Amino acid sequence: MKLENLTYNNENWSLVNSELQSDDYSKVNIVFLFGDTDIIKDEKIYSEMLTRYSNAKIVGCSSSGNIMNSQVSKYPVVATAVCFDSAWIELSTINFSDNDNIEKLSEDLINNLPKDNLKHIFLISDGLLINGSKLVNGINKINKFTPITGGMAGDGARFLETFVIANNFPSKRTIVAVGFYGDSLNIQSGCFAGWSEFGAQRIITKSKGNVLFEIDNQPALNLYKKYLGEHSSNLPNSGLRFPLNIKENEHSHEVIRTLLGINEEEKSITFAGDVPEGYIARLMKPDIDELINGAGKAAEVINKINDKTALGLIVSCVGRKIVMNQLIDDELEIIQEVLGDSVHLTGFYSYGEIAPFQDDLLNCQLHNQTITLTTIYES
């Protein structure tokens, strides 16, 4: 595997580092492209990448922060080109409308990828116009053969519009699945949160999809405001600092849900994923040290395969970036420290993270406020 990293600023591309020789450019398999919404949605960004890497698949999305090596890049767009020794890439893409059955479409998305020699799927989705829970529910119905990781596109902290690049010009309402193929590949993943629970454990007593109406038969928004105290005046933005931890029962895995919006009239809260009735719920608050340590724990599950150049794809939540502020590079630095310098990091801050738990690798989950890591080695 050979890699090339570039950054984009003031309408110019700058080379950060490259292992490519002149005859490698036509052999590049895939280019990952992540950037600020207003810049990356410009069609010329995609066109310039296609000119530079004429035979590559080009995928990516708008983001809430662009990762290059062990830092959140100060540049509005980052690109990582990957040239495999013998592995190859296939893509499956769908576009959806408001009336589409997302679970059925996500089944089609996975079914459309060839299955022979498929080692892993990395998925990027529109971050706002889709229910991420329905997306992973459909995937899990059909996927019984390979692990899936990825995330939902971001838009800074604006939550206005997101774009996905799926080997075409940037578009909304798009989902792309990247299939990695070949016996030379070893692909692993890890995820971890690191938030601290507080307050009483409660039961979700009324909800519909990702809209929460009542907890313990009390209006959800009233209860949330009570716990947030002075922070409640800044809802919904302050809700990014106080996500909800939910689980089906005492023996189930916990997942975190990020607050996206509130309805004062209904006293309801809209989250980034489903909050089913009957689930156990508990509020969470940030602990900076635990958030940073959580990133290290996500990396610690990765087994080092060799000292060759490898790729690390990171998808981390915008909520973590907002909470950690100037310390945000610390979670990337600890990942780099654990993995070593041979693993080159790229990725984005998202509106939702997709990854399995370690004890159930064929059942992906929608996470919020979580950092996920996918490492790709080639032997």
Image (spheres, rainbow, N blue to C red):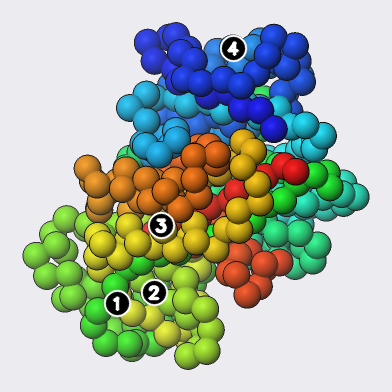
Q: CA distance from mark 3 to mark 1?
A: 18 Å
Q: CA distance from mark 4 to mark 2?
A: 42 Å
Look at discs 3 and 1 and give the one toward the viewer: 3
Look at discs 1 and 2 and give the one toward the viewer: 1
In the displayed structure, 71 sits above or below 273; it is: above
The amino acid sitting under disc 1 is Glu
Image coords of residue 253 (percent x, y): 52, 78
In the picture of the structure, the residue carrying the numbered disc 1 is 197
Decide: few, some or many residues near mark 4? Use Cα within 10 Å; few <14, some 14-19, many ≥20.
few
The amino acid sitting under disc 3 is Ala
Q: Earlier in the sequence, mark 3 or mark 1?
A: 1
The amino acid sitting under disc 4 is Glu
Q: CA distance from mark 4 to mark 1?
A: 46 Å
- Tell me if I can see residue 67 in this picture: yes
Image coords of residue 363 (percent x, y): 67, 68
Image quarter of the N terminus = top right
In the picture of the structure, the residue carrying the numbered disc 2 is 245
Residue sticking out furthest to the left: 230
Snapshot quadrant of residue 168: top right
Decide: few, some or many residues near mark 1? Use Cα within 10 Å; few <14, some 14-19, many ≥20.
some
Q: How many marks?
A: 4
Quick check: marks 1 and 2 in contact, CB under 8 Å? yes
Element under disc 2: strand
Q: Earlier in the sequence, mark 4 or mark 1?
A: 4
Image quarter of the C terminus = top right
Image coords of residue 98 (percent x, y): 60, 48
In the picture of the structure, the residue carrying the numbered disc 4 is 48
Q: Residue at x 39, y 24 (%)?
A: 76
The amino acid sitting under disc 2 is Asn
